[in-house]
Image (cartoon, rainbow, N blue to C red):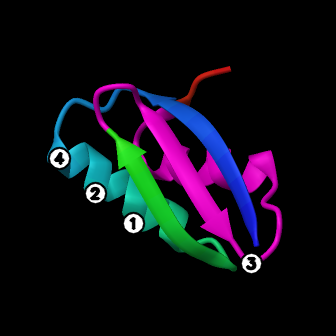
């Protein structure tokens, strides 16, 4: 089990949170996605470590950006 944390910018509502959760949840091996709207913090649990590229692509697909 691996846990990774990212900060996502641009989210303003519950729909935003749902979009980010849905797209990250499509990544192979992801078992849970916890999004905190107030801080933009996204904690992801997965069967194996994820690549930043996969997470950034999923967040981008949802219409948001990973803070760097």
Q: Counting residues from the N terminus, which is met first, the one under dot 1 or under dot 3?
A: 1
Q: Find the magenta span and give its range.
A: 37-65
Residue 37's tag is none
Residue 22's tag is 1
Residue pictured at 29% horizontal, 27% vertical? 38
Q: Counting residues from the N terminus, which is met first, the one under dot 3 or under dot 4?
A: 4
Residue hosting label 3? 47
Residue pictured at 59% horizontal, 57% vertical? 44
Q: Is residue 33 left or right of residue 19?
A: right
Residue pictured at 78% horizontal, 60% vertical? 50
Marks 3 and 2, how far apart at CA:
21 Å
Residue 14's tag is 4
Foreground disc of the pair 3, 2: 3
Q: Are marks 2 and 4 in contact (CB under 8 Å)?
A: yes
Q: Are marks 1 and 2 in contact (CB under 8 Å)?
A: yes
Marks 1 and 2, how far apart at CA:
6 Å
């Amino acid at each position: 089990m691996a846990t990774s944390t990212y900060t996502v910018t641009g989210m303003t509502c519950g729909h935003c949170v749902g979009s980010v959760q849905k797209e990250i949840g499509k990544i192979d091996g992801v078992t849970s996605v916890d999004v905190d709207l107030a801080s933009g913090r996204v904690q992801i649990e997965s069967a194996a470590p994820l690549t930043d590229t996969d997470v950034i692509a999923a967040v981008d697909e949802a219409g948001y950006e990973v803070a760097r």
